[in-house]
Image: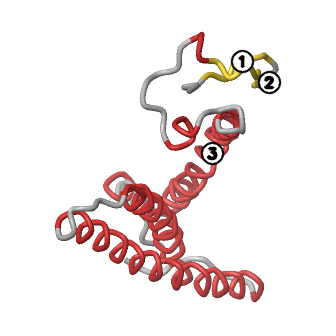
């Protein structure tokens, strides 16, 4: 595996941005690994040694792991070591290989562009559902699927249509 900088000529600005990206992501990723270990160890000790499980440790460990995955993918992409279909890539040579490399680089950006609007819609609905009209149970986690008679009385405008925001009401 070669470093991405050896494959593509870079300007001074892109080199500066690349080193800044490394200075930001790599310490954060190391901190996330240490935090993950501490959180999981604290949860296990609390549950099995003191017989008093911490309800928040699993959720925090999950969120920390997601951030670790995102930071790790940035680091791998920056180093040119991100997962990809190398078996397909090795079949191409010369100019065709450059086109396939470009498609492989643009594909994640296209995927993120496609997923962005539904993610924003989901975040908006979650924000409305977790507002002051929802119960504390819903804010923590929804133990059962919402029903029509459990609606919080708000509507949310998603993609131009009104949608009822439902949840568990105490």
- Screen quadrant of the C terminus: top right
Residue found 27% across the figure and 61% down from its top: 52
According to the picture, the residue beneath numbered tag 1 turns out to be 163
Question: Which one is earlier in the sequence, the residue at label 2 or at label 1?
Answer: 2
Residue designated by label 3 = 110
Label 2 sits on residue: 157
Above or below, 5 against 83 in this view is below
Q: Are marks 2 and 1 in contact (CB under 8 Å)?
A: yes
Depicted 41 relative to depicted 165: above or below: below
Q: Position of residue 34 (x, y in %)?
A: 39, 81
For mark 3, give the secondary structure. helix
Residue in view at x 53 percent, y 79 percent: 28
Q: Nearer the viewer, mark 2 or mark 3?
A: 2
Which circle, 3 or 1, is nearer the viewer? Answer: 1
The residue carrying pointer 1 sits among few (fewer than 14), some (14 to 19) or many (20 or more) residues within 10 Å by Cα, namely few
Q: Earlier in the sequence, mark 2 or mark 3?
A: 3
**Would residue 149 be found to the left or right of residue 53 on screen?**
right
Mark 2, other Cα within 10 Å: few <14 / some 14–19 / many ≥20: few
């Amino acid at each position: 595996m070669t470093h991405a900088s050896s494959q593509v000529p870079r300007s001074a600005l892109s080199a500066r941005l690349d080193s800044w990206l490394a200075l930001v992501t790599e310490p954060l990723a190391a901190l996330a690994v240490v935090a993950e270990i501490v959180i999981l160890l604290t949860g296990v000790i609390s549950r099995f040694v003191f017989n008093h499980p911490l309800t928040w440790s699993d959720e925090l460990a999950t969120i920390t792991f997601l951030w670790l995955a995102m930071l790790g993918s940035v680091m791998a992409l920056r180093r040119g070591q991100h997962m990809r279909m190398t078996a397909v890539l090795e079949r191409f040579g010369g100019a065709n290989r450059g086109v396939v490399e470009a498609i492989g680089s643009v594909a994640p950006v296209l995927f993120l562009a496609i997923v962005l609007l539904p993610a924003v819609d989901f975040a908006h609905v979650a924000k409305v559902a977790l507002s002051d009209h929802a119960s504390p149970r819903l804010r923590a986690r929804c133990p059962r699927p919402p029903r029509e008679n459990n609606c919080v009385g708000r509507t949310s405008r998603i993609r131009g249509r009104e949608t009822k925001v439902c949840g568990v009401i105490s």
